[in-house]
Image: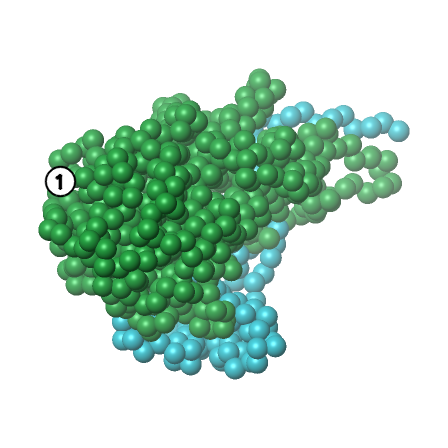
Chain colours: A green, B cyan
Amino acid sequence: MIGMTKSTTTEVDGVRTDRMPPVETGVRPARPSVRTVVARAALPVAMVLWLLSLRRVHLELMDDLGLIEVLPVLFWVALGVLTLGFACHLRGPRLSHAWSAAYVIGLIAIVHATPSLLYPTVRYSWAWKHVEVVDAMLRHGGTVPRPGWLDIYNQWPGFFTVNGLLLRTTGLHSAMGYAHWATPVADVLLIGPLLLVYRTISRDWRLIWGAVWIFFSCLWIGQDYFAPQTFGFLLFVTVLALVLKQLPRVRPPGAHPAPQLVPAAVSPGGTDGGGTAGREGWRPALFLMVVLCEGVLITSHQLTPLMLIAFLTALSIPRRNRRVVLPVLACAVVMQAVWFATVARPFISANLRNFIAAITSPDSNAPTWLTGLGSPAPGQILLAWVDRGLSAAVVLLAAIALWRRPWTRRTPLPLLLLAPLPMPALNSYGGEMIFRSYLFALPAAALLVAALVLRTGPPVRVRAVASFALLLAFLGGLVFGYYGKEMMESFTAREAAATEFLYRTAPAGSMIVSVTNNVPDIDKDYDRHTRVVIAWNLLANRQLLLKNPLAGVEDAVSLAAPPGPVYLILNRAQAAECYITGVLPADTVDRLATAVDSSRLFTPVFRNSDAVVYVLSDRNAPEIQPHPRPPQHAVQQQGGRP
Amino acid sequence: MNRPAPARPAKALPALKLPAFKLPALTRLSAARLGLAASGWLALAATTLPEALMPLRVTVAAAFLLVCPGAAALRLTHPVRPGRHRDTLEAVVLAVAFSIVIDTVVAEVFFFTRSITTLRAVGALALLTTLLALWPVGVRRKRAASRPGPADAPDRAAETMPVAGAGSDGAGDRSPDGRNAP
């Protein structure tokens, strides 16, 4: 399936084996070992157990550890069986690409498709927002006028325009349907580019598939949903693969690599007589396509092209790479500068001061709960320790691999690992830069960790058990980081019904107020309505909300001073966000609902068990008339993670 | 009957042998190449299907957008040298990635000119795919090879140059486990 080398081998039950000897010799094939049987049986067993485990999951019981608390034992057994099967598969006598791919897809299915199967609506409020941006751009046939705080998407439209094209061509009415499955699909699509990257560094397919498994086992930061960054990361890894393949290979003089690990970049067959060899420069058509890839990256996401520039800069450090890397790097820098100076100029000029301030304030990476007015949920402290521990362990193991596996130092892996590390010092990116850096370092780190822990040789059993335990530990860390905030990341159908009612009834020009922005589809028709998110307002307004909830809402309304109708929407996920992150005290939403219910100013127009929508009934009340205040736009920039 | 002694566990992992697989030839004016050239027009025709045939439209249009422009571009970016096979993994991955890139570029052009319509967007992509699919690749090399004398020496040299581990240019010059493809 992969590759074209003619082979004298055949496949029996999916296992590539040598041809059986003729019957007349009297030699019978050896019985499959226990390890082979486990490797073949574990995958289907795990899949069946996983599907059975999803029959009865009570999502409403989720608390501060999210899905971890409500997934049944059978789910965890399925994950364990799958890991055991993959560990056996990796150490089997023959490695089948089909089975390796099936195991990785099985892992993606269990970890990343479970939310899609369980949740009735799209996961992450940001995914809803991106769907609405696609719709708005299609509605206007281009740039969205009056986009409010979502103006940033007009300046990086690549991801949205290509989805618009897909909708136009297929005739689908909205991206909502496939956005629900974007996470597993994006992860499966990522397997190919990852294989291409790893293949330029090693020829050992056990190492390569092991690294792909480790990559998805440690991908806990949740940047693989319907979003420009997911799209950008896919292209980033592809560009990286294309560049790495063009790099000249180096063979260390007089040295042969370890037999277990035969990295392509240092293999005996790689070059003649040591030194460097390789393509001299780029084929023009391929170079043009790489530049086009960069162009699409630059027009689609703010951070990914900067990461690409950082990686290309790192790769250009060795003199032998420069002929390949510098032209690509130069094109990326020029195109990025042109984009910043033209289309993205409004955003850059508005935030230039913040960017400069971020460079001089390295503590700005503090998570939200350190700067919020409330305390995060108790489980979130544990979760923060676990996911940060996982990240630290991966980086530490990768560093040990660089030390203990000398061949890795002769590959681009050290550069790929270190390239994103300076980025957190340059910009906080809403407090997320350190996690984004981890994401971009993860492909290299995963291969390094695989090189360290998936080595064969005596003592065989000790190594096998240790690597299995480590793979399980990675997954244990992953589920904390990936499932731990699901109380606020998931939405019920009743919450979505409230938003649907709101936008069906609210006339154009209405103002929609909420405590946080964690409402499904709240940015529907965002070019027709004004949004006020109290959690993003000035500290004085937030403090007033805590002291007197009704006065806080009135203050927020008067600050925005809209001419049209005013709606207030409160839902379960806003309360969950306050509880989970501590951005506001956990009872803020409930106190506000109680206060508004007894107020003469607001009238409930929609209510179910998970959400309530109020309309401002007395538009001329003195409490909500505009009065002079400092501008609130400064905190509107805290929007989150585009 | 003596059973063979169980093989001792090898110290080094055996090299992975990869199955032989041949992608449709895109170098000659093959049916696959003609199909690629026609795929965009088929997708354009699919956009006129009635609502009842929506699943067919979605399938045809999505398949075209996700594979065909990139597969056509691959002929230029990764031409297959005579006697070599295309690297399947690389071809599949890059066909999808390049398709997405080309789709995005076309969509952005219409986005910034505020002139996007289904006919224009799919028509532009279909035209581009047809041009890329029918673009004569390797004609110059063939002509040079057919001429006697030193003029063809560089090409012959290029084709016989060892490529293993050398970051070979053409997809399929080297199989994924590092050996030269037959």
Q: Which of A632 and A308 is in front in this view?
A: A632
* Quadrant of residue B142 within the rendered picture: bottom left
Q: Which residue is drawn at 28% across and 36% down?
A: A546
User: Relative to A586, is B6 on the left or the right?
Assistant: right
Q: Image height check: is A26 above or below B153? A: above
Q: Inspect this view and state whether residue B85 appears.
A: yes
Q: Which residue is drawn at 23% across and 59% down?
A: A620
Q: Which chain carries label 1?
A: A
Q: Nearer the viewer, residue B28 or A150?
A: A150
Q: Which residue is drawn at 42% across and 46% down?
A: A571
Residue that carries the numbered disc 1 in the rendered image: A357
Q: Could you say where residue A182 lies in the image, as x and y percent from the top left?
A: 48, 53
Three-letter code for the amino acid on which mark 1 is drawn:
Ala
Q: Image height check: is A630 above or below A619? A: above
User: Relative to A245, is B20 on the left or the right?
Assistant: right
Q: Image height check: is A61 above or below B78? A: above
Instruction: Give neighbour class at mark 1: few <14, some 14-19, many 20+ (Cα, 10 Å).
Output: some
Q: Residue at x 38, y 46 (%)?
A: A597
Q: Could you say where residue A573 lies in the image, as x and y percent from the top left?
A: 43, 43
At numbered mark 1, what does the secondary structure look like: helix, strand or loop?
Answer: helix
Q: Which of A485 and A187 is in front in this view?
A: A485
Toward the right, the furthest residue is B1
Q: Which of A476 and B135 is in front in this view?
A: A476
State the count of labels: 1
Q: Could you say where residue A379 lies in the image, as x and y percent from the top left?
A: 43, 27
Q: Could you say where residue A514 lies in the image, as x and y percent from the top left?
A: 33, 49
* Quadrant of residue B182 within the rendered picture: bottom right
Q: Inspect this view and state whether residue A556 appears.
A: no
